[in-house]
């Protein structure tokens, strides 16, 4: 079932859910806000380079839309934590995800939060994957995604102290969601070289292909 939504200046997608018979349901969570009437909605999540300004929330939404298109092609159920360019609050996004879990309790769920990274040290680079503390199914899914994203050729910013590559934190969306949840930090937009790649549509599609390979493996993970 695909449910249409009214399209207005606040929206960034043409639908808020695509639900079919797939066993796995993905919540695509594009972090922060986007653009409304040329005004960025999350001023802290941006970086001014000499020739351009990188807006993280815009990047997150661009990847979310590409990922949604690939999920449609593969017939995998998914929905957005927000269909708006407004900087939707963390509680609203997590409650929405938890409500889908209640609606479809017999399905497998994955909350996938998409972000870019930044640091005061402009040479910082690479990707990171985060889960909540302690070992859960999230860690297993994160490892699958990590093992695909490392083929981007970027620095893999990992933490193997607990036996797997993901880093752990009590980020709100990781702690408040009731399903496996993984947060992706896909490059440092404070790094000029990586920011240019992150803004490139072809490179965005390449990143999404790595994510999709991981999702397809997660889809089959508990079927083996």
Image: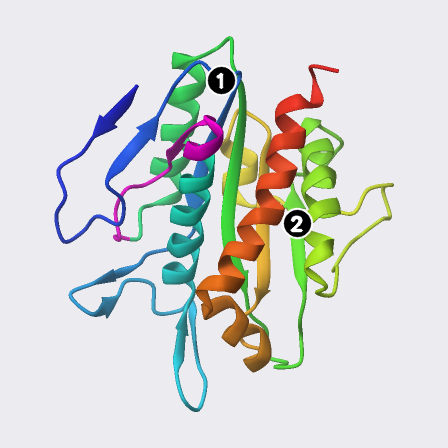
Where residue 188 appears, as percent x and y from the top left, is 58, 69
Q: Quadrant of residue 174?
A: top right
Circle 1 residue: 22
- Which comes before the other along the chain, label 2 or label 1? 1
Image point (68%, 65%), residue name: 126
- Mark 2 and mark 1: Cα distance apart in space: 25 Å
Locate residue 181 relative to residue 101 in the image: left or right. Answer: right
Circle 2 residue: 129
**Residue range (magenta):** 72-86
Locate residue 138 relative to residue 160 in the image: left or right. Answer: left
Residue density around tag 2, few if under 14, some if 14–19, many if 20 or more, within 10 Å: many
The quadrant of the picture occupied by the N terminus is top left
Give the structural element (helix, strand or loop) at label 2: strand
Image point (69%, 27%), residue name: 137
Task: Determine if the magenta segment contains residue 215.
Answer: no
- Labelled disc at residue 145: none
Question: Is label 2 in contact with label 1 (beta carbons under 8 Å)?
Answer: no
Task: Determine if the magenta segment contains residue 80.
Answer: yes
Where residue 95 appears, as percent x and y from the top left, is 38, 29
Image point (57%, 55%), residue name: 207
Where residue 47 appears, as percent x and y from the top left, is 45, 77
Q: Quadrant of residue 193?
A: bottom right
Give the structural element (helix, strand or loop) at label 1: loop
The quadrant of the picture occupied by the C terminus is top right
In this view, 206 is above or below 91: below
Can you see residue 166?
no
């Amino acid at each position: 079932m695909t449910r249409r939504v009214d399209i207005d200046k606040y929206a960034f997608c043409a639908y808020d859910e695509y639900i079919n018979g797939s066993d796995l349901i993905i919540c695509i969570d594009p972090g922060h806000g986007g653009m409304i009437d040329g005004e960025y909605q999350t001023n802290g999540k941006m970086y001014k380079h000499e020739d351009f300004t990188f807006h993280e929330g815009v990047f997150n939404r661009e990847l979310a839309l590409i990922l949604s298109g690939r999920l449609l092609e593969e017939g995998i159920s998914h929905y957005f934590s927000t269909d708006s360019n407004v900087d939707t609050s963390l509680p609203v996004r997590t409650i929405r995800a938890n409500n889908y879990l209640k609606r479809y309790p017999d399905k497998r769920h994955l909350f996938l939060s998409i972000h870019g990274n930044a640091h005061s040290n402009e040479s910082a680079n690479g990707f990171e994957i985060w889960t909540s503390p302690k070992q859960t199914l999230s860690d297993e899914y994160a490892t699958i995604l990590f093992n695909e994203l490392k083929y981007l050729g970027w620095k893999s910013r990992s933490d193997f102290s607990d036996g797997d590559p993901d880093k752990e934190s009590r980020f709100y969306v990781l702690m408040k969601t009731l399903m496996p949840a993984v947060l992706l930090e896909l490059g440092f937009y404070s790094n000029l070289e990586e920011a240019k790649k992150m803004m490139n549509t072809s490179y965005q599609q390449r990143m999404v292909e790595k994510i999709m390979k991981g999702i397809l493996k997660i889809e089959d993970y508990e079927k083996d």
